[in-house]
Image (cartoon, grey):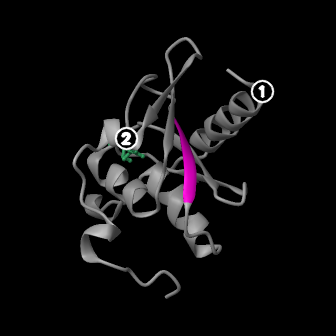
Amino acid sequence: MDPNDRRRMDDARDAATRAYAPYSGFRVGALAVAADGAEYLGANVENAAFPSSICAEANAITTAVANGARRIEAVYVTCLDDPGCTPCGNCRQIMREFGVERVILDGPGGEVQVLGLDELLPRSFGPDSLGSPRTSS
Ligand code: THU
């Protein structure tokens, strides 16, 4: 793993320690890298009304977007309580919206796996399916 990957995954692991997961006890951390190189962290934030919970990847990506990013190059994902887990379908779709190219998954032994979004979400539906999306508002 290159040093930048290692540092980013370490930051995602730190974010996972700050997850609010009192119901599942399943802590997830994510780091989104925007097209300009800026990095945004996320952790899962659960809610007593379960569907109101937010996944770590969605948290990181939407934070990036709220800070002005419109294209996300890569997302690093780590699950402290189940090393090797992969992003849920909803998060894969959110990745698709913002053009994520690489998804870096943490592994049980600290090794990582790099996947293309087309592997995680083949034959997907995205902005191009609707013609030109509005990207500024
Ligand atoms: N979770 C994530 O944060 N990301 C995923 O891709 C899968 C699931 C969270 C949601 C919930 O807080 C907990 O993990 C158990 O599903």
What type of secondary structure mainly makes up the magenta span? strand
- Residue 81 appears in which quarter of the rendering? top left
Q: Any mark on residue 88, and which?
A: none
Looking at the picture, how far across and down is residue 89, in whole percent? 27, 48
Magenta extent = 72-77
Q: Is residue 108 magenta?
A: no
Question: Residue at coordinates 30% horizontally, 77% vertically from top-left?
Answer: 131
Question: Residue at coordinates 46% horizontally, 57% vertically from top-left?
Answer: 99
Amino acid at the residue labelled 1:
Pro
Q: Residue furthest top?
A: 109
Looking at the picture, how far across and down is residue 61, in whole percent? 52, 59
Q: Residue furthest bottom?
A: 137
Q: Which residue is label 2 attached to?
A: 87
Question: Residue at coordinates 70% horizontally, 39% vertically from top-left?
Answer: 11
Please tell me whether residue 21 is drawn above or below residue 26 in the rendered image: below
Dot 1 alpha-carbon crowd within 10 angstroms: few under 14, some 14 to 19, many 20 or more? few
Q: Which residue is label 1 attached to?
A: 3
State the separation of the CA atoms marked 1 and 2: 23 Å
